[in-house]
Amino acid sequence: MNSIRKKLGGIIFIAVFSFLILIVFNFFYTHTINKANLEKDAFLNIALKNKQLLEKFALTRSKDQQYLRAPTEELAEETRQSIDEIIKEVNSLLNELDDQSSFTESFQLTKEQFEKYKEEFSFLESLNQKIGYDSDTGFQLERKRTKEELEQAITNLDNGKLKELLLQLQQKESAYFDHKTEGNFISTMNSLHLFSEEIEKQILDDDLRKQLSELANNYEAAFNQLYGAYEQQKRIVLLFDEIAETISNTVSETESKVMEEVEQLANKTENSITKFQWTTIGSSLILIGIVLGISYIISRNLVISIYKIKKGVQTIENGNFTYRVHVKGKDELAELSKAFNRMAEKVQQSFLNISDSANHIQSSAENLATFVKETTVQSEEFGQAIQQVAIGANEQTVQIEKGLGLIKQMSESIYVTNEKSKEIASDAEQSEKEGQNGLEVIHELEKTNHHFDELSKSLITQVQKVSKNFQQITNIVQTIEEIAENTNLLALNAAIESARAGHAGRGFAVVSEEIRKLATRAKNETREIQQLVEQLNDDISTLTENAETFHHYKVVHGKSVNTTKDAFTKIINHMSNINGQIIDITRFIDNMENMGNEIVNKLDDIHRISEQFGGVAQEVNASSETHMEAIQQVNRAANSLSQISTSLHQEIAQYTITLSDEGNQHDKKSPKKKRKTRFFWKKG
């Protein structure tokens, strides 16, 4: 990452990536819970339908018991309809179940048993129809008819012994029909045999005896037929009870199997939830640690770099151009520090060149002033000694030649000073351009700071969204906890109702107890989830505080950028002033150069005139006056040049452009040799 924008973008990318990872974990967690709940609901639905089958079967059993005690066509129809409804529900449940389900075989077996139960009941119903639902149908009608015929015949016969035996037979028969035991049947058959034997013993007509014997035999046959039907009915009832017991055991085993599946599913769900919880916690802590660590490193580097640049700007603002900023890296702040150092180096070099040029100007001004003084004295002496021109013509020629040499030296110094002034002007102009470049870098830094502000606000917004999402998760957990509490209350009410139902509600009580346990476990799990969410909320709060700290660093960065911008503006203004003064100096130097050339020309004229001075004294006198005026102009120009040099030295004295003997503290020591600046002030 070579720029601040990329660094901040990396932080936001990691934060968003972390948030997406948490969302993915939350999605898988919710998917697992929903899947487990669907499976549990399916199992509980199977258990409920199995319970309903058991309840309907119990109702059917009560109906068939009523039918067995007092068989009627209405009870038979109701019992048959109940069995058909049970078989229909079993078929519906088998259609809902998958062929691969572990309960398909159990319910298929239950279906077969119910069909067998129906088949046996149909056979029992057919047998009862043969027996007869009352004394006017079936075998009972035949027994009644033969009995009535026998009784009628004995009554018509009016035989006391046979009537007595017939009465005993009727009592034995009533005892059999009351209890339907084998002993009562044998006792009845013995009484019937005694009755038949007594008929043979009685003195009767053969036809009457034959009729009575036939009636007794018909009665015996009807009674035996009825007894055989009752015995077959007993066997069917026993088989009926066995099938019912088998069905009850099968349904109970299915219910136990369903509850085992529910318990295994609950354990599996609990393990999955625990795994997802620890995975989410670990991932969250790792991602938060990464974000905080990277954010701390980046913010620390930014603060250190900004502090160094701020310190450098304040040092430059205070006038120390020897200070250098050293910022490691390849971001905008490092580029800014390099540009700052280049600008400071060029400004320092410009001030050194200006100082050297000022020294040359001061020296030239002093030489020019000395020369003007000497020339003035010489001119005065020349005015006083004009009458002695003839005597001192040779000496004056020599002095003029010396003055001409000095003027030429002054012209050379002025030329050198002019060149130095141009170099200084060029350096000042270059420094002003570098200042403008630095100011442009500051503007770019202001734009970066603006992007930094937007990214910081975006980071805070994302963190706040994450906090709101965790708040929604907390609300969902609270809702789940309330559902668990309501489920627990419903399970308790169901347990109370099943207790009231007695034996019929025992299986439902087991289911309600398991539901209550699952509700309690779900409540405990939701509490643990709520604690984990609260811990994550604390971590998010810490991340929010760090984001606010980023925002604070952004404010500090903005202030530093503004301070740097102001410092660059001041430097550019100072360089503009210096550039203006240098332009004035250059203009004065150009005037001095023109005046020097004019003086040289004048001295040449004086030299020629001095050779002819003896004959042209009046012309020399006029030239002397002109020479004095030129010398006064040169003197005034020298004084102006001296004042400009003094002002320039005063302006430069406000800044530190060389290292002192004690040295200055800065980021990196400069290997350059210490350079002293000498200042020349106008004497007198």
Image (tube, rainbow, N blue to C red):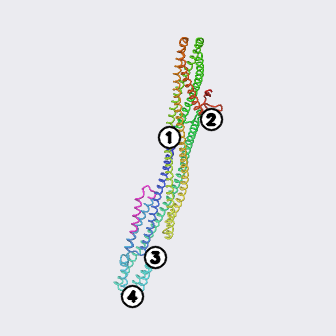
Dot 2 or dot 3, earlier in sequence: 3
Q: Which residue is mark 2?
A: 665
Q: Which residue is mark 4?
A: 159
Residue 454 screen position, x and y as percent = 48, 45
Evaluate if marks 1 and 3 touch, with contact meaning CB atoms under 8 Å apart: no
Horizontal side of residue 409 vs 72, given as left or right? right
Q: Which mark is residue 431?
A: none
Camera sees residue 122: no
Residue 447 screen position, x and y as percent = 48, 40
Evaluate if marks 2 and 3 touch, with contact meaning CB atoms under 8 Å apart: no
Q: Amino acid at mark 2?
A: Gln
Q: Say few, some or many: other residues with alpha carbon within 10 Å of mark 1 (under 14 / 14 to 19 / 20 or more).
A: some
Q: Amino acid at mark 1?
A: Glu
Depth check, front residue: 404 or 605: 605
**Is 102 included in the stretch rendered in magenta?**
yes
Q: Which residue is mark 1?
A: 446
The correct choice, above or below, for 552 with respect to 159 in the image is above
Overall secondary structure of the magenta stretch? helix
Dot 4 or dot 2, earlier in sequence: 4
Q: Amino acid at mark 3?
A: Thr
Q: Which mark is residue 181?
A: 3
Dot 4 or dot 1, earlier in sequence: 4
> What stretch of residues is rendered in magenta?
80-104
Residue 243 screen position, x and y as percent = 45, 66
